[in-house]
Structure formats: structure tokens, C-alpha cells
Amino acid sequence: MPWISAAEDHVDGHTIDNRLLTILDHYSTTANSESISMPPNPGRTSYISGGANMRAGSGSPLLFETTVSPERYPSLRKSRAFMKDYHACTKVCAGLLGTAFTSTPSLPTTDAPQRELHSAIASLHLNELYSDLIIASTTKSYPVHKVVVCTRSDFIAGWCRSDRDEVADGILSLPNDDPLVVDAMIQYFYRLDYAVPVEQAQDQEDAGLLFHAKVYTLAEMYLVRGLKELAVVKFKTASLSQNWNTQGFLDAAKEAYTSTPETVRTLRQVVLETFAMRKELLDKEETQEVIKGTDGLAYDILFHFHQTQYNF
């Protein structure tokens, strides 16, 4: 059922017609379960969803206005449930209040500001202009900007606030991390995305599964939450690819189970779901060797299959 709002300057300050509440409450319990609800419209002070939780202020007689309508959200016309609820609700309220039911007109929108901001940040990628920090891998130094990287990585933010000598030098060295994975993290800081290096994709022929697992590990280490989520999405997508390589997946499974704390479960869960989706993997000798040699993996597979009631 669409949200209905009462404008602040059109609310009876003493009573609300009990008949209105009774009918709307009844309507809310009998409405189609697929009816669409939307958040309240900002700037309104009283809201009803199915007649519940209405509050009155002060002013003149009630005047209701839909904040969700077919006119404002054309895509809603495709939902028969919404149209049924919409027409029924407007008819009930208009009849009881003796007033016309009006729809908030569509307002012009644009994503130009967001695109401009994204483009501006992306333009700073590998750009020394305004750079105030260097992140160095074993093969490359990246001019970065604290306002960008410190707001994305809690680890880097903490490092920049510390009193280490390297902080004064303005160089954060990452000598123990895969330089290609570090490059992916830098890409993400500025472009909200990263690409699997061509040479790795060609060498592994595994749709990048191991690379995405390594990105997830690095994001966990440096506390880059958005990058962790992106790596999981890319891993899931790659696991469905026709470009499937068993050894690549097994290497990625080992990465997930050996390079992150046991409490970090998101990527491990995707690994288990992949085993469940491709149960034939369990018949392979190389899979059995990995399962036996990876702490916790055998138990997790057994427990996952039990929980989801898969048949061996």
C-alpha cells in the first residue's frame, strides 16, 4: 500500500475521524501482500501506512497527498498489486474526507553531480597533482591523496596519524604484499573498481578466482570494506564462468582459508557455496588433497551440506 502523508498545516489538532482509522486499519490487513511501500517523503510530519501510526498536529481539516504514485514512479504501473492498492486507497480516503486526492508531481532529476565527482576523483589516479602521500609496492610507487585513501582505509588512516618515522617521510611501503594486488587496491580507491591483470588471467585460466581472493585478503588486512565486498561479488561472478579451472578454484579456496582470520567468513561462505554448486569437485583427487590439508575446510563443507540439505 502506498505511503500517505498529512501535510503539517492541514492536520486537525484534536481528533481524527475514527471511521477513517477503522477503514484504513481494515484495509491494511486485507491488502495484497505484494503491495509496495516506500519511505516517507521528506518534509512531511505525519504518515500512514495502511492506516497505522497516524499522528495529528494543529491546523485545518485533513488533506491527504500520495507521496508514491504511478505518475511519480512510472515503473510502478507494471505492478498490478500496486495499482490495485493505489486506486482502492485513494478512493477510500477521498470518499471519507470529501477532498480530491492529489499526487506529488515528478521532479526533474540528474546524476550529473555524482558523475562529476566520480570523474574528478578518477582523474587523480596516478596523478601527482595535490598528492601528499606515496604508497609503494615492491615494483611501483603510487602518488595518492590522504583525503581519498584515508577515508577508504581505516588502516591507512591510522598509519597517517601515527608517529612513525615513515609517516614524516610520507611513504607507506607494502613490501610483503603482491604488487599486482596492491595495484588493484589503488585502482579501487580512485575508480571504485579493479581489473584482473591480463598476465594473471592468461596464466591461470581460472577467471581470476585466485586474484579476487587475494584482493579480498588485502582488503581485510588494510580494512577497506567496500573493496572486500567488491572482491566477493567478482569472485561469485567468476565462479559461475564457463572459463572454469579446478586448480584455480582450489588455490583460491586455500587463500580464503589460510590468509584471513577464522572469524572472517564472507569469502569462505562463497567457497562453500561453490563446492555445493559443483559437487563433482569432491570426486577429484586434487580437491581431496586440498580439503585434507586445509584446516577447517572439511568441517565447513560437511556442516554447510548438512545445513542446506544437499545430498552427497
Image (cartoon, rainbow, N blue to C red):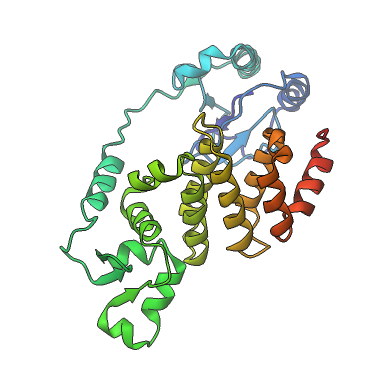
Q: Residue at x 43, y 64 (%)?
A: 153
Residue 100 visible: no
Report the front residue among 29 and 57.
Answer: 29
Q: Quadrant of residue 136?
A: bottom left
Q: Position of residue 19 (x, y in %)?
A: 75, 23
Q: Quadrant of residue 264?
A: bottom right
Q: Position of residue 27 (x, y in %)?
A: 74, 20
Q: Position of residue 63 (x, y in %)?
A: 54, 26
Q: Residue at x 60, y 48 (%)?
A: 250
Q: Quadrant of residue 28?
A: top right
- Up-down relation of residue 63 to residue 178 (above or below): above
- Up-down relation of residue 161 to residue 275 (above or below): below
Q: Does residue 312 appear left or right of residue 204 in this picture?
A: right
Q: Position of residue 7 (x, y in %)?
A: 51, 34
> Most extreme residue toward the left, as rendered?
129
Q: How many numbered circles are shown? A: 0
Q: Quadrant of the N terminus?
A: top right
Q: Quadrant of the C terminus?
A: top right
- Up-down relation of residue 127 to residue 72 (above or below): below
Q: Residue at x 59, y 38 (%)?
A: 46
Residue 124 visible: yes
Report the front residue among 1 and 128.
Answer: 128
- Up-down relation of residue 134 to residue 294 (above or below): below
Q: Does residue 259 appear left or right of residue 26 in this picture?
A: left
Report the front residue among 21 and 261.
Answer: 261
